[in-house]
Image (tube, grey):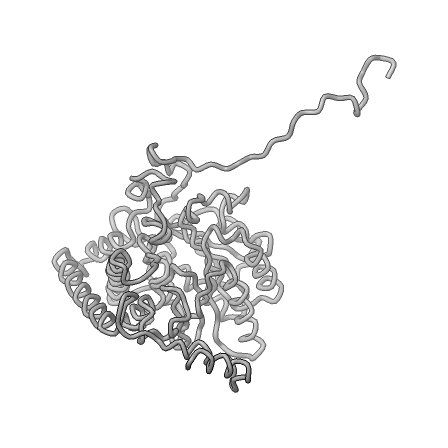
Amino acid sequence: MTDGTPTSGARERRALSLTIPEPDARPGGPPDFSHVAIPRAGAIRRPGIDEEPEAMRDLAFGIIRVLDRHGAAVGPWAGSLTPDELREGLRHMMTLRAYDARMILAQRQGKTSFYVQNLGEEAVSCAFQRVLAPGDMNFPTYRQAGLLIAAGYPLLKMMCQVYSNDGDAARGRQLPVFYSSKAHGFFSISGNLATQYVQAVGWAMASAIMRDTRIAAAWIGDGATAESDFHAALVFASTYKAPVVLNIVNNQWAISTFQGIARGGAGTFAARGHGFGIPALRVDGNDYLAVHAAGCWAAERARRNLGPTLVEYVTYRAGGHSTSDDPSGYRPKQESENWPLGDPILRLKGHLTAIGEWSDERHVQAEAEIAQAVGEAQKAAEAIGTLQNGRHPSPREMFEDVYAEMPPHLIEQRQQAGY
């Protein structure tokens, strides 16, 4: 140009850069949860069961809480459980924690190869299971053992599966903690993350196609929401209004990667539902009463043929990702003690005590009874076998349970193997 102004092609070009999300604290630094905005208990509204998704966008950004700091149940989400049901829920969570402690020790002793604990997340699975009806189906990850415990699945069978002994219902075909029980509404766990999300939606669609009454519950961790299966599941759930509850357990850490990587710029995981026209709730995952109330709302919506609901449980993985993980390598050592939503067991204990339905003495007695029951189950399981010794499924069984009639090439392979 004649006036000296550079043309667009000659303008200075600035180098581009990527934004890499970083956690608020790393090992050696002080824990920092200032980014977790926690509304007061009872402050979040409860929408009508048939409210349109567009009218409840606000619920994806708050946190539904029932228990306040004094142990009182307050607000529109309170009142879904009786004292007897709450005591039962407390025992379920205490049992899961005691079971975890025993199995972690067993792994350290070489009795099993691997274990995944639920420490700090007990309320999510134990409370949600009480929402479901017989015949409903969970499609879980490896950190929802509370679904089985709350459904009455025997501890002995769970332990035999962890030990892969001759009492293992999976007959040694699965990794430890990869449980399976159709009778208890617990679909076989897969080590391929996020696959269970599309499976849950497909199962729910099939239930609707058959004019059945059963609903499905999908489970996923915050990290696995970055998988394509998560988004594909939301497309189908939204399009066909499948009777499914889409659960996201946001425990802040996906192995060594903090939740901000998978969350992206959405602000919350619950907000992901907005792009698909799916109603979304965000819940205090360490509040047993809040988890149960939100689960009831979502399940009722599915049962009334109103479609799916996305539920994000805000919680914290207090232990390692598994027995193969050392969390001190990527987060402050004292971080779990500073989690602002507290311990789910202590919070429910505090509530029951506050309303005169529990006490420190009864809690100590319950701990002793649960420890004895878990110990007896472990003794019985180890009498059958552990990784080190005892009775194990026959290798012959790897050829079975696949075909109604075994094809000739497998018969030949089995004979070659001496079985």
- Residue 240 in the image: above or below residue 253: below
- Give residue 221's quadrant in the image: bottom left
Q: Residue furthest top?
A: 3
- The residue positioned 21% from the left and 66% from the top of the image is 374
- The residue positioned 36% from the left and 52% from the top of the image is 324
Query: Which of 57/111 is in front?
Result: 111
Left or right: residue 139 compared with residue 201: left
> At which x and y percent is residue 414?
46, 80
- The residue positioned 34% from the left and 59% from the top of the image is 114
Task: Quadrant for the N terminus, please.
Answer: top right
- Residue 344 in the image: above or below residue 25: below
Left or right: residue 77 compared with residue 302: left
Query: Which of 331/30 is in front?
Result: 331
Task: Quadrant for the C terminus, please.
Answer: bottom left
Question: Can the viewer see residue 90 in this picture?
Answer: no
Question: Can the viewer see residue 188 in this picture?
Answer: yes
Left or right: residue 322 compared with residue 356: right
> At which x and y percent is residue 235?
61, 60
